[in-house]
Amino acid sequence: MSTRLHPTPPAGFAPAFVASVLDDAVAHGSRVYGIGGLQGSGKSTLAAQVVDLARTRDLRAEVLSIDDVYLTRSARQQLARDVHPLLATRGPPGTHDVAMACGLIDALRRGGTCRLPRFDKIADDRLPASRWPTARDTQLLIVEGWFLKTPPQTEAQLVAPINTLERDEDAQGAWRRYCNTALARDYPALWQRIDRLLYLHGPGFDIVPEWRWQQEIALQASDPARTAMARPQVERFVQHFERVSRQAWRALPAIADWPVALDSQRHPAVPPPLKKGD
């Protein structure tokens, strides 16, 4: 399997917690297991750890990140011209190829062979398909993403801008309404394909800029010859995610099958997972 280009937190999760996540997936018969959490919460790291552990138990496991199914850079640039300039920036609802993600999950459920897309965050585009890893006879697929199963907002909630990006670059609300409409219309088909959801519930959105900056440092360190984002760019970038992130933080503890609280150092306070049928 090719090296992933997702940045990771400074350290992984404790082996006992990783084992409890895999045990939860297996105990509930999950073929597609979701791991959600705010940007920088450790979703990619945990997903990779769970897959590594699954393989030691002779389970054929793979990871699909919501970040790997972004629309291509050219497609987002077209949306920016046709709908709103902010849609050039990857991340918010409306900037993913949801149909591709659903097709991949369906193929893996059938036990088929397929290529798993990978996204290069420094280049801001998908890697060439020739560099996508191949998955065969997958028994467990971990789907990880920052807004898995997040519900849309009401029209009233969309009226007031929540940060300087929305105030200065989306004064009429066209961008946030487009993203919210996409979240309501397109993404439920993907959410329905996730059998069970673990949500890493961080202390709040205010920690996200720091967590995301740590990710960017790790991303730059993984490929020093290329240029990642500077701190001011990261601060602006996370504002694209703030509205839906805050909605996720409020709503997902009640929606997720297993919410796990994280402190600012990403240490989980682990309650027992709900039993099958609860």
Image (tube, rainbow, N blue to C red):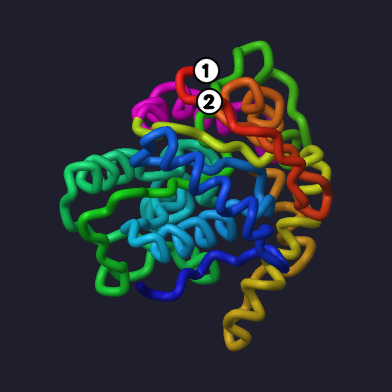
Q: Amino acid at mark 1?
A: Asp
**Above or below — where is 154 with respect to 104?**
above
How far from the left and from the top, in percent, is residue 230? Answer: 74, 69
Instruction: Identify residue for label 2.
Output: 275
Tell me if 9 is positioned left or right of 106 in this view.
right
| Residue 152 placement: quadrant | top right
Whether tag 1 and tag 2 are in contact, CB under 8 A, the answer is yes
120 falls in the magenta region? no
Q: Secondary structure at mark 1?
A: loop
Please rate how many residues cluster around mark 1, counting C-alpha atoms within 10 Å: few if below 14, some from 14 to 19, many from 20: few
**Above or below — where is 157 with respect to 231?**
above
Instruction: Identify residue for label 1.
Output: 278
Stretch in magenta: 169-192
Q: Secondary structure at mark 2?
A: loop
Q: Quadrant of the N terminus?
A: bottom left
Picture residue at 55% right of the left edge, 22% below the top: 151
| Residue 259 placement: quadrant | top right
